[in-house]
Image: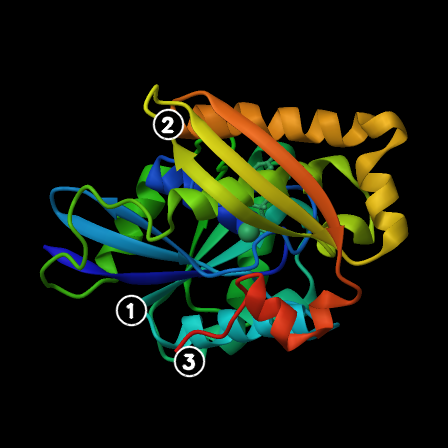
Amino acid sequence: MRSGTVAVIGRANAGKSTLLNVLVGEKIAIVSPKPQTTRDRILGVLTREEYQIAFVDTPGIYRQRNALTALMMKTTETTSKDVDALLFVHDGHAGLKEEDIVLMQKYAALGIPMLIAYTKIDIMPKEKIPADIKMLFEAGVTADIYPVSARKGQNLKNLERAIAQLLPEGEPLFPEDVVSDRSEKFMISELMREKILLKYEKEIPHGVAVIVNTFERHENGAYEVNLDIVCEKQNHKAIIIGKQGQALKEVASFARKDMEKFLGAKVFLTVYVKVREGWRDKGSLMKEFGYTEEE
Ligand SMILES: Nc1nc2c(ncn2[C@@H]2O[C@H](COP(=O)(O)OP(=O)(O)O)[C@@H](O)[C@H]2O)c(=O)[nH]1
Ligand SMILES: [Mg+2]
C-alpha cells in the first residue's frame, strides 16, 4: 500500500479547495470566487484499497498585507516543506504568466515529488492547453501536468492515481473512516464564513472572523448554534446587518441550510455581529479567533 501526505498549493483562487473536495468526495473546505477564502491548513483524507492520500489544503500564495495574510502565507510555506508530495494547482483559464512558471520552479526546487493540476478546463478553449504545456516544458518545468476540471469531474481519476504513485510504500496514516481532521464545530464556522464571502463585497468578508460560542445537540437531534460574526469596523457591521436586518437574515438563513445539510439535522441558529477594530493585525485577537501558528 502507498500512503502519505500531499500539500495542495498554488495561487489564491486557483481552485485548490474545490479540487480537494472532489478528490476526497466530501465538502471539507469552503470555496468562493474571492481570494483568501481558505485561512487554515485543512486535512482531507482519501482512502482506497491500494493507497491512502492525505491532502493538506493550504491558504495559497499571497502577498503579505497584514498579520493574518502573513500567517496564511507562512502556513502554506511550512506545510509545503513537510509532505511526501506536492500538488500544484494552476488555473488554466486564468492564463499562464511568467510568475506562474517562477512559482512552479520554486516549489519544484524543494526536491519533493510534484504534479501540476491544470484546472478549470471546462471554461477555457481546449486549444490553449497543449500550447501552455509546451510553454511549461520549454521553460524547464519537469513535473507531469494533468489538465482537469474539478467542477465537471474531468480527468480526476488519472490525477488521483498519479498522485498515489508519488507516495512511499507504507501503512495508512489515518483510520479508513477519517475524512478530515477538522471538527464539526470548525466546519460550522467555516460554512458561515463561506456565505459571508459569497454575499458581501470588497474588504468586508476578508475582515470577518466567525466564532462559534454554542454548538450543542439536543435530545430531539436538533442542533443549537450561537455564533458571532466579528468584523473590523462599525460601518462594516452596519452593512453586514443591512436595512432592518435583511442582509444578515438572508446570509444566516443561507448558512443554516448548509449547516443542516452538513450535520443531517435541524439547526437553530443565532447570529450576533460584533466589531473588533483591526483584529487582523492584533496577535492576541487572532489567537482568540483561532488563527495561530502550528507547532
Ligand atoms: N469553472 C470552474 N470553476 C472552478 C473550478 N474549480 C474551482 N472553480 C471556482 O474557482 C473559484 C475559487 O475556487 P477555490 O477552490 O475556493 O480556490 P482556492 O482559493 O485555490 O482554494 C470558485 O469560485 C470555484 O467555484 C473548475 O474546475 N471549473
Ligand atoms: Mg481554498
- Within the image, what quadrant is residue 126 found in? top right
Please state which amino acid type lies under the numbered disc 1. Answer: Asp
Position of residue 61 in the picture relative to residue 48 (left or right): right
- Other residues around mark 1 within 10 Å, as few (<14) / some (14–19) / many (≥20): some
Instruction: For marks 2 and 3, give the CA distance.
Output: 49 Å
Residue named by callout 3: 110
- Other residues around mark 2 within 10 Å, as few (<14) / some (14–19) / many (≥20): few
Tell which circle, 1 or 3, labels the residue nearer the N-terminal end.
1
Q: Position of residue 130 (x, y in %)?
A: 55, 48
Q: Position of residue 270 (x, y in %)?
A: 61, 33
- Other residues around mark 3 within 10 Å, as few (<14) / some (14–19) / many (≥20): few
* Of the two numbered discs 1 and 3 in the rendering, the one whose residue sits closer to the viewer: 1
Look at 11% across and 63% down and name the residue there.
169
Residue named by callout 1: 84
Label of residue 168 in the image? none
Tell which circle, 2 or 3, labels the residue nearer the N-terminal end.
3
